[in-house]
Amino acid sequence: MDDDGVQTAFELILEEIGSVSKELKEEAKRLVDRDDFDSVARLMGTGKQLDSFQLKVKSLQKEWVQAFDPETRARTHYDPVAIETAPSQALSLTMTYAEASATATCIGRKVTVLPGSFVRKKIFESMHENVQQRRKEAEASGILVPCQDSELLEVTEEVPFASPSAAAQFVAGCSVSGPREWQISGKGVSLKHWKTDN
């Protein structure tokens, strides 16, 4: 629901939690390589708390939708900062998340995931329901097909999305922040930092 500001806020919170969770996992891997298992144990505890909090936010999000009618929900409004590019300027993007790797183009707010990308097969509960539906439809129509890696699906056709985060969730299989996860090809900076600097 585009006009539902509280729903939008919930989505942004879940994206940020997903991004922090990913950072904790990456930090834990580095600590394991350094044999710092005490710090790994501490991070695991934090990760479990974060997962528990994420489930609470999801529960509140569902309660918001179920308890209030669309007209009431539409009275709330929130304008997140949009990452805009000039309509004529297409940015090339890349994204790596766990085993998944994807390429995309970005024009304005629209991000199109390109053929040859690989998305995670597993769908986590934190993924937004609309994106979950897109994933199911893409599999049913042959836009997502199995590949050699049983944990991944390959994209066979362009898949357009209205926002960077929706496209990023499609790839990651969970709630993530698109502006933070998508990288500008060849620049080594995130879409979020690119917008800040340009």
Image (cartoon, rainbow, N blue to C red):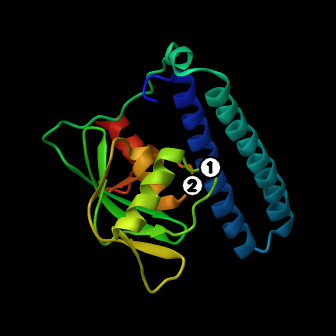
Q: Please state if 141 lies on the left or on the right of 172 as rendered.
A: left
Q: Nearer the viewer, residue 159 or 31?
A: 159
**10 shown above or below 168:** above
Quadrant position of the C terminus in the picture: top left
Where residue 103 sits: x, y (%)?
Answer: 32, 63
Residue 39 lies in what quarter of the image?
Answer: bottom right
Residue at 68% x, 56% y is 24
- For this orientation, the residue located farthest to the left is 88
User: Residue 22: which quarter of the image?
Assistant: bottom right
Give how far across and how far down residue 138 sits, in percent.
Answer: 38, 62
Please tell me the numbered disc located at residue 174: 2
For residue 3, side relative to residue 90 (left or right) = right
Count of numbered badges drawn on the protein: 2
Label 1: few (<14), some or many (≥20) within 10 Å? many
- The answer to whether residue 67 is above or below residue 150 is above
Q: Distance from label 1 to label 2 (Cα)? A: 5 Å
Where residue 45 appears, x then y in whole percent? 84, 55
In the displayed structure, 4 sits above or below 190; it is: above
Q: Amino acid at mark 2?
A: Cys
The residue lying toward the viewer, choosing from 95 and 134, is 134
Q: Tell me what residue is drawn at x 39 percent, y 45 percent.
A: 164
- Residue 114 picture location, percent across and down: 28, 63
Q: Are marks 1 and 2 in contact (CB under 8 Å)?
A: yes
Q: Which residue is mark 1?
A: 126
Q: Which residue is pictured at 29% across the width and 34% down the height?
A: 84
Task: Classify mark 2: helix, strand or loop.
Answer: loop
Q: Is residue 140 visible?
A: yes
